[in-house]
Image (cartoon, rainbow, N blue to C red):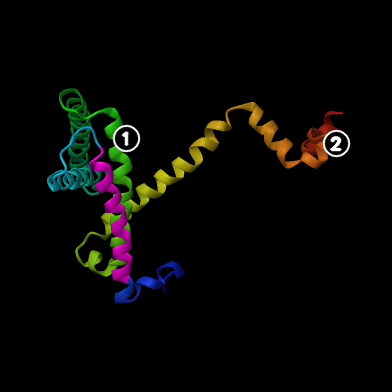
Amino acid sequence: MCLGWQMHIQTLRGRILETILSIRFAIFQYGIVYKLNLTGNDTSLAIYGYSWLVLFVFIMIFKIFTFSPRKSSNLQLLLRFIQGVTSIGLIVAIALFVAFTDLSVVDLFASILAFVPTGWAILCIAITWKGLVRSLGLWDSVREVARMYDAGMGMLIFAPVAFLSWFPFISTFQSRLLFNQAFSRGLEISLILAGNKANVQA
């Protein structure tokens, strides 16, 4: 039983069309890569290939951090050590690239802006060819990446809401917006919202 939004990929024609549509995100990556300060005026295709190599390295690092053995505690200790070394090595590598090459901090944010849609394209293609991906044994990795995207989008959407909730005037503004007609009639909204608590205190 497939979901309604997956009906179009149940046929070979639909899968091919969905794959072609997903390639547009890779074109987006192509445009951003050649705008980086690191590339300069070089427009060779090798640079675009290097960007895919960097993306593959990040996927492998992601696999290292999401791999969790359950049988051996010694293996878990070794894995935590590898994850720590990988984190330190990644931070040092990025710092060295920024210090000794033309890579700038702005380029790092631009690279994130390029790789996030490309990862989404990979997810779309993997879902489109789910049977093939499952036969290759990569479906668990696809699910982990999908969970990461889900968590990232949730943080992106709700972070402004959580940040604004710290300010007291936001709740006042929200009450004013929701009960604008009641305010205009001169009603005491605080007493209405308090309910029985106001009567008990009285």
Which contiguous range is marked in magenta? Answer: 15-35
Q: Quadrant of residue 115?
A: top left
Task: Count residues near mark 2 (Cα–Cα under 10 Å), then give few for <14, some for 14-19, many for 20+.
Answer: few
Which residue type does callout 2 highlight?
Leu
Residue 54 picture quarter: top left
Residue 179 image point, x, y percent: 76, 41
Magenta-span inclusion, residue 32: yes
Majority secondary structure of the magenta segment? helix
Rendered residue at 24%/42% (across/down): 33
Q: Residue 109 carries which label?
A: 1
Q: Mark 2 points at which residue?
A: 187
Please provide percent x and percent y for residue 25. Answer: 31, 53
Identify the residue at horizontal 41%, vertical 72% (top origin).
Answer: 7
The residue positioned 40% from the left and 44% from the top of the image is 152
Seen in the picture, residue 35 relative to 94 is either above or below; the reply is below
Q: Is residue 67 visible?
A: no
Residue 137 in view? yes
Residue 177 x, y percent position in the rendering:
71, 39
Q: Which residue of the protein is positioned furthest toward the front in this rendering?
A: 41
- Element under disc 2: loop
